[in-house]
Image (cartoon, rainbow, N blue to C red):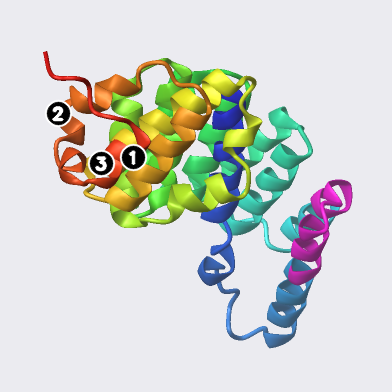
Amino acid sequence: MRYLIFRTLLLAMLFGTCRLGLSLSEPPQSNATAQTSVSEGQKTCDAFRAQKDYPKAIACFQDAIKKDGKNAVLYNKLGMAELQASELRGALADLTKATKLNPRFAEAQNNIGAVYYVQKKYNAAAKYFKKAVALDETHATYHVNLGTAWFGMNNLDRALAEYARALQLDPDVLAKNTRTGIAAQLGTPEERARYEFMMAKVYAQLGDTDRCLECLRRAKEGGYRDLGKVYEDQEFAVVRRDARLATIIPAPASK
């Protein structure tokens, strides 16, 4: 299960920070030349990171910070590059600096949570993911990440609640990850099947019968052993009215 969660976390984290360019702090307008220089420098740094050349990206962001040492976005980007390079100590220090410069920087709070999650410090990860959610409750990926931390602590009810909220905000947020092979990261077919059944329950709660049935079909193909619960659990009440369910999971024989 945790192979899936780690993959989900990284994808969600990267998706959550792709908007950073929209929140760049502006240098004083009186120095247009310096402003242009810093902006172009950040583009170069972003390009290194996009190419997964993390050592160059780190060096580039460090040089940019020398010119603009109070830019929380730069510290966040540096921390992200360090996290992707597995330089966790530096990542935590620079992401923390970003939150000190801007305590309401939700992306940076989220990314601190990611550092702690990689270190398997799930309680600390949840703390920072909750901070990100509190600052931007409408960001679906923050809910995904918080759910990920709850999964790490085997708190399935809270995890499913966060996934459900994420799907309310963005119905495709988990489906995108599944299509890119997240379920394939699970260690065994049994784990993948269990994940699919749990996601079927989430989609059922949201009234998305089509996706619920897709997940149930994959759970069945994976050999999930408790498929009969679909005829018992309250979450599947609406799905039980759909004739397609019986073609996937036959109804139990009447006693």
Whole-angstrom CA distance, mark 1 to mark 2, is 20 Å
Tell me the residue that label 3 is attached to: 204
- Verify whether residue 91 appears in magenta: no
Q: Earlier in the sequence, mark 3 or mark 1?
A: 3
Compared with residue 152, is residue 243 higher up or lower down, i.e. above or below?
below
- Does 14 appear above or below 131? below
Residue 158, image quadrant: top left
Of circles 1 and 2, the one toward us is: 1
The chief SS type of the magenta part is helix
Q: Look at the numbered disc 2 and give the secondary structure of its residue.
A: helix
The reply to whether the magenta stretch includes residue 51 is yes
68 vs 182: above or below = below
**x, y (%) of residue 5?**
54, 30
Q: Residues within 10 Å of mark 3 (few under 14, many from 20)?
A: many
User: Residue 173's x, y, as percent?
Assistant: 44, 52
Q: Is residue 211 left or right of residue 30?
A: left
Does residue 163 appear anywhere in the picture?
A: yes
Q: Quadrant of residue 119?
A: top right
Q: Which amino acid type is shown beneath numbered disc 3?
A: Ala
Q: How much space separates mark 3 and mark 2, taking CA atoms?
A: 10 Å
Q: Which quadrant of the figure contains the N terminus?
A: top right
For the residue labelled by badge 3, is the local secondary structure a helix, a strand or a loop?
helix
Residue position marked by numbered label 2 in the rendering: 234
How many marks the image carries: the answer is 3
- Residue 211 — which label? none
**Residue type highlighted by circle 1:** Thr
Q: Which badge, 1 or 2, comes first in the chain's sequence? A: 2
Which of the labelled discs sits on residue 247, or is there none? 1
| Highlighted magenta segment, given as a residue range | 43-58
Disc 1 is placed on an element classified as helix
